[in-house]
Image: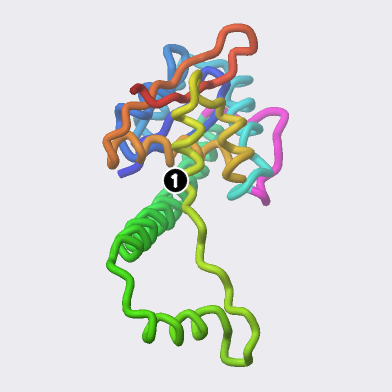
Amino acid sequence: MPIYSIDSDNNLAVHPDADAATKEADATGAAFETETDFTQAVADWPASRLVDVWNGFAGAPPFAELKEVKRFTDRKSAVARIWNAAQRLGETLEEEMRFAEQDMLRAQQETASALKPAKAARTAAPKATKATTGADGAPAPKQREGTRKAPVLALLEREGGATLEEIMAETQWQKHSVRGFISTLASKHGHVITSTRREGDQARVYAITK
C-alpha cells in the first residue's frame, strides 16, 4: 500500500515504503498511510498550510483539472480533498513504477543479448539488413538507447548528488514521480540514497552513498 508524505515545503508525494515517506516528511512535515492518519497528522496545522499543500499540486499532472484555492470551506473538506488527490497520486506511482520496472527488465535483456556470442557472418548479414529496414524499405526505428534509471543514477552518483529540480529537468517528471522513483531505487534495488537540504538555497539534494 502506498505511503504518502508532505514535506516542510508542503510538497505532497507518494512512496512505496514507510521509511522513505518518513525521511521525505522531515521534522515539520507528515507521513501517512490512511485518511485517519492524515487527519491526525495535520490536526495542528493552520488552514493556510493546507491551502499551500493543495495549491502546490493543483493544475499540475495528474491534477491538471484542479484549480488553486484561496481557502477551504472547513478543515474536514480540506483534508478530504487532499486525501482524494493523494489516492490518485498513489495510482500514478504504481503505473509509473510498472513502466520503470519494464525499462529495467528491457535493459537487462538488451545487456544479456549483447553478451551472447556473435553468429556466423553468413547469417548475421541478412539479419542486419532486415533489422535496419522496414517492410517498405524505409529505415526501421532505432531501439531504445537507455532507460530512465541510467540517467537518474548518473546524477545521483555525481559528487554532491543532484537536486530535485535537476532530476526533474533530466527526466521530464513531476516532483512526485521523482520522489517515488528514488524510493523504489532504495527499497527494491538496494541503493543507499541520502536526502538532505543544501545550505544556502535550501534545495532538496539526493545522492547515492558510496
Going 49% across and 26% down the picture, which residue do you hit?
Answer: 158
Q: Is residue 131 left or right of residue 19?
A: right
Camera sees residue 41: no
Name which residue lies at 42% across and 36% down.
182
- Residue at the disc numbered 1: 149
Nearest the viewer among 25 and 197 is 197
List the single residue furthest toward the bottom. Answer: 136
Please provide percent x and percent y for residue 163: 56, 25
Query: Dividing the image into 4 quarters, which one contains the N terminus?
Result: top left
Q: Position of residue 172 (x, y in %)?
A: 61, 45
Q: Is residue 139 magenta?
A: no
Q: Is residue 47 above or below residue 17?
A: above
Q: Nearer the viewer, residue 43 or 29?
A: 29
Q: Position of residue 65 (x, y in %)?
A: 67, 51
Residue, x 59% and y 18% (percent of image)? 203
Q: Which residues are magenta?
A: 64-75
Quarter of the figure with residue 99: bottom left
Identity, as a three-letter code, of the amino acid under mark 1: Lys
The dominant secondary structure in magenta is loop
Q: Is residue 189 above or below residue 28?
A: below
Residue drawn at x 59%, y 20% is: 49
